[in-house]
Image (cartoon, rainbow, N blue to C red):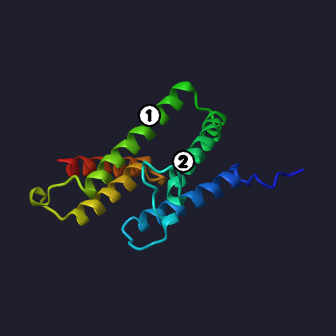
Amino acid sequence: MKSINALRSGRVLSIDAFRGITFVAMIFVNELGGVSDITRWLKHMPADADAMSFPDIVFPAFLFIVGMAIPFSLNARIASGDDAWQLQKHVVYRALGLIVMGVFMVNAEAGFNAAAMPISIHVWSLLFYAAAFLIWGVFRFENPRVTRALRVTGVLLIVALAA
């Protein structure tokens, strides 16, 4: 009997669906942050309130679904032949990537000195996202040197933006 929840790719449909709903909810509540005169259940509850609202459950939902996906991700890598060292290397690579992207994204919002920047923050942000795509994007060419050259270009761009 075929499971309804399993896709041909081996992915779990319910996890992918919940992840998608969570991402849409994150975008929705982040866009509401600057809106005034909205109903109370669409605002974060004050820290001293013994209550929760819709925006207050989005981040826990995100953490939940990330935690649910980790065993599937690790098992898929093990099934593809990765050993413990390769798994650790991959986890560290992903963690460092998320940290770097987080630092750049936070600084693009409020941690920059516009007078000291040779380009506008908007151009800087676009260049950062281009660099992130070049480094962490999933693309393969017949010649692996092309992929490596794109990743090196992305790293050099990140270094230039950090300077």
In primary-sequence order, the first of circles 2 and 1 is: 2
Q: CA distance from mark 2 to mark 1?
A: 23 Å
Q: Among all residues in the image, which is located at the extreme bottom?
A: 37
Inspect the image, locate mark 1, and give the three-letter code of the amino acid beneath it. Answer: Val
> At x 38% / y 72%, what residue is drawn?
36
Location of mark 1 (residue): 92
Q: Secondary structure at mark 2?
A: helix
Q: Nearer the viewer, residue 19 or 53?
A: 53
Q: Tell me residue 144's x, y (percent).
A: 44, 47
SS at badge 1: helix
Amino acid carrying label 2: it is: Pro
How crowded pointer 1 is (Cα within 10 Å; few <14, some 14-19, many 20+) is rated as few
In the figure, is residue 101 to the left or right of 113?
right
Q: Can see residue 110?
A: yes
Q: How many marks?
A: 2
Is residue 60 shown left or right of residue 9? left
Report whether residue 153 is seen.
Answer: no
Mark nearest the camera among 2 and 1 is 2
Task: Please tell me which residue is depicted at 30% across the width and 63% down the height of the picture.
Answer: 126
Residue 34 appears at what percent x and percent y? Answer: 36, 68
Q: Residue furthest top?
A: 84
Residue annotated with mark 2: 60
Mark on residue 101?
A: none
Q: Residues within 10 Å of mark 2 (few under 14, many from 20)?
A: few
Task: Reply above or below: 137 against 28.
Answer: above
Residue visible at 34% across and 49% down in the picture = 149
Q: Write the residue at 50% across / 58% down.
A: 55
- Residue closest to the eye, 34 or 86: 34
Nearer the observer, 12 or 113: 113
Q: Determine the residue located farthest toward the left in the rendered image.
A: 115
Q: Position of residue 84 (x, y in %)?
A: 56, 25
Q: Whole-percent x and y of residue 148?
A: 38, 46
